[in-house]
Amino acid sequence: MTNNKTTHHNGFRVRTIPELTKPQIRRFWNKVEIGKHNDCWNWTASTSFGGYGQFSIQHDNWKASRVAYFLYYGIDPAENMILHSCDNRLCCNPHHLRTGTSKDNTQDAISRGRHVATRTGTVLDQEGREMVKLLYCYDVPKNQIAVIMGISYSTVRNICLHG
Ligand SMILES: [Zn+2]
């Protein structure tokens, strides 16, 4: 084990969440709309990272869901991603969060994409368009997105370009 703050994973810098002070922890949970065990606990402060909550620790920004996971489970997700079982990017309910690799995340998005596509056919509603953008975010190739969503390549390209 190393004490370095930074490790490398697949060429990417992996940041380690710093130890949080009590006031920082209080400041964090104050920004979360804490609800019942099974409810989504939405982040109420600023967002970034494509719609995820954003929390700054010592001038460094972190995904709120990542910090929530860290504070609740005491485990730094490090190179793993935080996956939302509720599909709600603002959610900081630790019970809705789990870690996974970016491959898991893509697989999740693909299976959700199939689900949306089955339900909406070839006409994409807002949810379908969001799904296309999400798959695109996860670096799924556009031609693959087209197949998953049951739409044409040019439709995919349009959505990715113009939202
Ligand atoms: Zn949730």
Image (cartoon, rainbow, N blue to C red):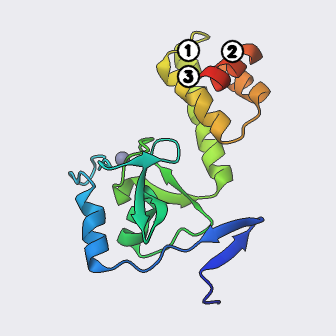
Does the image show residue 85?
Answer: no
Does the image show residue 122?
Answer: yes
From the image, tell me which residue sits under label 1. 124
Residue 105 horizontal/vertical position (percent): 61, 48
The image quadrant that residue 112 belongs to is top right
Say whether marks 1 and 2 touch (CB < 8 Å): yes
Residue 161 horizontal/vertical position (percent): 67, 24
Mark 1 or 2: in front is 2
Distance CA(mark 3)–CA(mark 2): 10 Å
Tell me the SS state at disc 2.
helix
From the image, tell me which residue sits under label 3. 129
Amino acid identity at mark 1: Leu
Say whether marks 3 and 1 touch (CB < 8 Å): yes
From the image, tell me which residue sits under label 2. 155
Image disc number at residue 136? none
Q: Residue at the spot x=53%, y=60% of the render?
A: 99
